[in-house]
């Protein structure tokens, strides 16, 4: 009951206060009017202050953190993960040429030995093939010489036989004429010729004609033998060539050449070579270690150096090509100069953190590449050194960077 009475009293007091103060608030004579007046005064004062204050200073340079790199960046040279490094063939800081051997992986010695073994086999096979070819060439020369000998020596012999046949033919003809003459004389009784004399002359005719027939048969046999010898030489020559061909086919020169090519390719797979000319800037493995995801070597072309500056995305629109840049390594060191060469096409998170504890650890930046003017010998051994960069903003005909946002 007491609570109800208390609530009624409070409600009555509030009602009376509202009836008393309401007209004053609506007429603008209350404290709310004072608050509004104060706000108007402060607004007019701020506007007047903005009109009277001097214009904001124009930005003359862009400051950024950067890192030193060889022109073209670093080239990581690795090996298949899980393979063991057998040997390192270069030293840190050494200049290398494109294709030069930098190191070898496990299995290099065995595969190199395999190559040497196949090379020895191939050399023996080639020597054997050459011997067979030389032997076939000798047999070929022998057959050609015999053929030439036949053509050279048999010509005069044939000529002699033909001449002898002509002489024998004349002699046989003369003997027959004498025989016929004796027979004619005996028949006509013009001379006294005995039968023995006629018989003797007939025998002479028979002998001369038999000798002529033998000579002609000998010439014919000579021609037949010559033809057979030439055919035999031709067969011998073909046999020699077939033997040489069979011997060459039995010697596995081509298969050994293919095996050698495959073995050399296997050796090349165990060798780490430089993809381009440059300088060895880092060696991340030692002989006997297992290669991991990191590269075994890192190389770069330190003949020209550049600085990669991380410029805030809000300031990158002011960057132009060929703008001058000042590069400082640390306090007290001499500054280096350079010019803006190029820029990235995407916005990314910053990778370089300064020493300022109040600086943001996460910033969205665009990488600007600055070509360092020569001489810059001190920078050649300072890859990834953090530097301070000031890019002077000036008029330039080149358009600024156009970048895409990287989430």
Image (tube, rainbow, N blue to C red):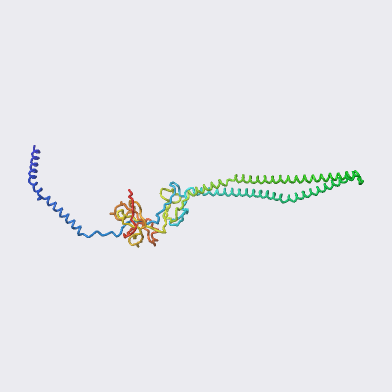
Q: Is there any visible trace of residue 4 in the rendered image?
A: yes
Residue 97, position in %: x, y? Answer: 46, 56
The residue drawn where x is 85% and y is 47% is 177
Q: Quadrant of the N terminus?
A: top left
Question: Image quadrant of residue 316?
Answer: bottom left
State the residue lying farthest toward the right. Answer: 192
**Residue extending farthest top:** 1
Q: Residue at x 76, y 46 (%)?
A: 219
Q: Quadrant of residue 189?
A: top right
Marks counted in the figure total: 0
- Using residue 240 as the reference point, say whether residue 262 is left or right of it: left
User: In the visual, does 49 lie left or right of 110?
Assistant: left
Find residue 50 and report its image quarter: bottom left
Measuring 65% from the left and 45% from the top, which residue is drawn there? 238
**x and y, in percent, of residue 363 in the image:** 31, 52
Is 235 positioned to the left or the right of 312 in the image?
right
Q: Identify which residue, 151 or 194, lies in the foreground.
A: 194
* 253, 49: nearer the viewer: 49
Seen in the picture, residue 271 relative to 3 is either above or below; the reply is: below
In the image, is 342 to the left or to the right of 34? right
Q: Position of residue 369 (x, y in %)?
A: 36, 56
Res 328 visible: no
Residue 95 picture location, percent across and down: 45, 57
Residue drawn at (84%, 48%) of the image? 174
């Amino acid at each position: 009951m007491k609570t109800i009475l208390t609530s009624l009293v409070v409600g009555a007091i509030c009602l009376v206060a509202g009836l008393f103060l309401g007209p004053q608030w609506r007429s603008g004579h209350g404290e709310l009017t004072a608050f509004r007046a104060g706000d108007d005064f402060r607004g007019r004062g701020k506007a007047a202050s903005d009109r009277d204050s001097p214009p904001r200073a124009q930005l003359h340079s862009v400051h950024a953190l950067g890192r030193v790199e060889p022109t073209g960046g670093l080239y990581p040279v690795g090996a298949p993960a899980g393979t063991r490094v057998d040997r390192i063939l270069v030293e840190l800081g050494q200049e290398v040429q494109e294709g030069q051997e930098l190191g070898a992986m496990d299995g290099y010695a065995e595969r190199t030995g395999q190559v040497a073994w196949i090379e020895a086999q191939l050399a023996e096979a080639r020597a054997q093939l050459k011997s067979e070819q030389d032997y076939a060439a000798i047999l070929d020369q022998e057959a050609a010489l015999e053929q030439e000998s036949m053509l050279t020596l048999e010509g005069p012999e044939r000529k002699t036989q033909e001449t002898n046949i002509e002489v024998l033919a004349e002699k046989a003809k003369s003997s027959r004429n004498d025989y016929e003459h004796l027979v004619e004389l005996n028949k006509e009784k013009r001379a006294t010729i005995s039968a023995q004399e006629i018989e003797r002359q007939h025998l002479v005719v028979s002998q001369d004609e038999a000798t002529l027939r033998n000579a002609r048969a000998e010439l014919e046999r000579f021609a037949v033998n010559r033809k057979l010898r030439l055919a035999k030489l031709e067969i011998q020559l073909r046999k020699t060539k077939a033997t040489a061909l069979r011997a060459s086919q039995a010697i596995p020169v081509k298969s050994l050449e293919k095996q050698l090519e495959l073995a050399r390719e296997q050796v090349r797979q165990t060798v780490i070579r430089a993809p381009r000319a440059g300088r060895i800037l880092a060696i991340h493995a030692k002989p006997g270690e297992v290669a991991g995801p990191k590269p075994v070597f890192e190389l770069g072309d330190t003949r020209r150096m550049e600085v990669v500056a991380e410029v805030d995305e809000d300031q990158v629109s002011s960057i132009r090509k060929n703008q001058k840049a000042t590069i400082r390594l640390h306090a007290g060191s001499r500054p280096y100069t350079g010019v803006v060469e190029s820029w990235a096409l995407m916005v990314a998170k910053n990778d370089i953190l300064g020493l300022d504890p109040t600086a943001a650890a996460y910033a969205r930046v665009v990488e600007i590449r600055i070509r360092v003017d020569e001489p810059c010998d001190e920078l050649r051994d300072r890859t990834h050194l953090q530097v301070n960069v000031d890019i002077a903003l000036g008029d330039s005909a080149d358009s600024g960077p156009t970048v895409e946002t990287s989430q």
